[in-house]
Image (spheres, helix red, strand yellow):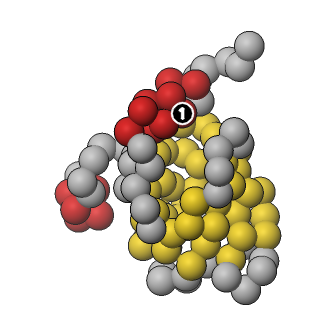
Amino acid sequence: MTEEEELRKAARRPVTLPARCRTAGGMRDDAIMSDISAEGCCIATRSLHLNIGARVVLKPEGLEAVSGVVRWIAGQRVGIAFDTPLYGPIVDHLSERHKVGFAAR
């Protein structure tokens, strides 16, 4: 377990959830959320180059936009801490509907 994972308040749930990502400077790109918890998520984008501490707004498919800050970067993966935690049942719904390996009907 990494130090970052040990510091998390809640376990992240594996998902494959399409989203849009926008930086404070107005740059935008499609993103894929690969895990989620009430406090944050991990995303990957093709063209955005983010720095630790950068402010972002994520618009996951089927959800209102959520804002947050970049906490870590590992290659193409970026850890985002949400400014306001997501409501628990929302996280439950998203993790069930978009869990890894789930085929949308």
Asked if residue 88 lies left or right of residue 44, the reply is left
Type of the residue with mark 1: Leu
Relative to 21, say whether 101 is above or below: above
Give the residue drawn at x 65%, y 51%. Answer: 64
Asked if residue 4 lies left or right of residue 88, the reply is left
Relative to 101, say whether 39 is above or below: below
Relative to 81, say whether 96 is above or below: above
Give the quarter of the image for residue 76: bottom right
Give the residue drawn at x 59%, y 48%. Answer: 33
Question: Where is mark 1, residue-wise?
Answer: 94
What SS does tag 1 mark? helix
Relative to 14, say whether 64 is above or below: below
Give the residue drawn at x 56%, y 67%. Answer: 67
Query: Is the residue marked by circle 1 packed among few (<14), some (14-19), or many (20+) residues within 10 Å?
Result: many
Q: Is residue 45 in view from this perspective?
A: no
x and y, in percent, of residue 91 in the image: 45, 38
